[in-house]
Amino acid sequence: MAPKQDAAMTYRDLTIGNIVTEPGSAAAYRTGDWRSQRPVWDKNVCVKCGRCASVCPEPCIVHDAEGYYEADLYWCKGCGLCAYECPKKAITMVEENV
Amino acid sequence: MSKRRGIEASAAVAEAVAAANVDVIAAYPITPQTHIVERISEIVADGILDAEFICVESEHSALSACLGSAAVGARTFTATAGQGLELMHEVLYVTASMRLPVVMVVANRALSGPLNVWGDHSDVMAARDCGWIQYFAENAQEVYDLTICAFRIAEDHRCLFPVMVNMDGFHVSHVVEPVELLDRDAVASFLPPNRYPLPLHPDRPVTMGAFAPPVLYTECRTAQEEALRATFPVIKEAWDDFANRFGRRYAPVETYRLDGAECVLVVMGSFAETAAAVIDRLRDAGKPVGLIRLRLWRPFPFAEIRQALSNARIVIVCDRSISYGGPGGPVCSELKAALFGHAHQPRIVSFIAGLGGRDILPEQFASMVDRATEIVERNLPVDYEIIGVRQ
Ligand code: SF4
Ligand code: SF4
């Protein structure tokens, strides 16, 4: 199962026993599909402590050019751990408008 | 090339495992399968078979260990019965969906409750839809032959499915019979080495048993179902090759005295041998009866069954388990499904017998024929009847 093309795959494309032959291919899996809320950072409050990045289960929180943090929404599943753990309450979970 | 010996059917299974040069056995003893693992552990301990015998604490672990062993490409065997098969239930499905060629012999046993260690087909029927190839052996020679065939079928790259070989608990498993044992070279010529196409190996990492979200699960299931149906010619080819080499022929649907038979008995498992003797007697008395021994249970031989029943007026199906609250016997409902909507519609009568180790006596088979004829001729509203219940 090559996750990149999940939605395009027919049953004939599957390997025997659905064995995944490409190592590390889990990274291609778009967990961002699960998200109903997204984290939004307030740079005026953030002290760049990095706790949000260390608790993110994906882990998809990366530095921007100024050293502040942001989520890569390809993987961010909207779990809210970053917002919960932020000591400064710099992160707000905002509803996705689907 | 071969030798004939009087041995217990369970010991014959162990001999088949040795002859097939199995690499890994993981099993947990349970009546009436215990003699199989007991004998295999002796064969391994005595150095007759160079294999890993993994002692486990339950059947769930037994099949899990087998799954792992098959995943690295080792030839793998296990055996169980009754409650043990039920404890394996979760892993049965996983083994099939992962397409791992594990071979298992089941000494069929009734399910609790009430607790009963004797034979019937409740255990295999509860595992009917687990995705394994499933077939039945009627005696010690058959279970020996069909266990060897099971490795060839399971490991064939056009197949790659686990195979369950069923034999009736006690009525077959504990009976001493003459068995022609093949030598290892002869078996090796029939059974090429196992070469699983994508084994677990540090040099070529793969992920097995990954999850499939809604966007993929239907495709995975479709692929599995189509692949299982496609094993049918592979199974027949293996049995035919076995017949050509060793002289004993097996077929998905085996017929006995069907010429001119208006009334046909359908039996799966060892009681088909008793039924065959009854058919002989009734034929001698001028009754137009015949017998179908259903050998292959999954994938179900729909076309062969229709063909075999194409001249029958009355079909009697004798099941050894009950589908509670359902249509009667599970073999019977499969047969009805096979015939429904087709041009030739014989009347089908369902009987259930031989539960929890009870014999089915020759006179009971004979009375099934009379009773079925009565039900059909008087058009009685009977879904199914249980034979020999004291009431
Ligand atoms: S945990 Fe809060 S304060 Fe720390 S880096 Fe992340 S957003 Fe900034
Ligand atoms: S919401 Fe969850 S997944 Fe998204 S960035 Fe925060 S911790 Fe990571």
Image: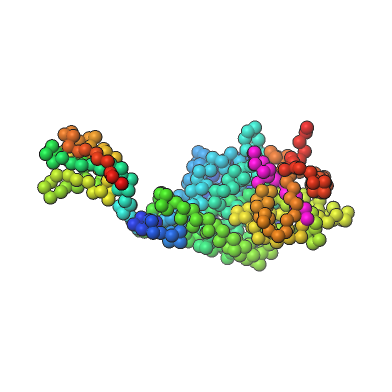
Q: Tell me where residue B356 sits by quadrant.
A: top right
| Residue at the image point whose x is 32% and y is 48% from the top | A33
Query: Is residue B66 visible from the viewing direction of this image?
Result: no
| Residue at the image point whose x is 22% and y is 35% from the top | A85
Residue B324: x and y, percent? 64, 39
Q: Is residue B155 above or below residue B119?
A: below
Q: B316 left or right of B303?
A: right
Tag count in the figure? 0
Tell me where the magenta segment starts and ends, as one range: B313-330
Colouring scheme, one of rainbow, by chain, secondary structure, one colour = rainbow
Residue B32: x and y, percent? 64, 41
Query: Which residue is more in the foreground, B308 or B341?
Result: B341
Residue B53: x and y, percent? 51, 47
In this view, the residue farthest toward the bottom is: B244
- Residue B98 magenta-highlighted: no
Q: Quadrant of the C terminus of chain B?
A: top right
Query: Is residue B279 visible from the viewing direction of this image?
Result: yes
Q: In which quarter of the image is the N terminus of chain B?
A: bottom right
- Residue B319 magenta-highlighted: yes
Q: Is the magenta stretch mostly helix, strand or loop?
A: loop
Residue B68: x and y, percent? 45, 49
Query: Which residue is more in the foreground, B98 or B147?
Result: B98
Query: Which residue is more in the foreground, B380 or B335?
Result: B380
Q: A41 left or right of B131?
A: left
In this view, the residue farthest toward the right is: B285
Query: Which residue is more in the foreground, B127 or B154?
Result: B127
| Residue at the image point whose x is 68% and y is 62% from the top | B249
Q: A56 left or right of B152?
A: left
Q: In this view, does B159 lie above or below B24?
A: below
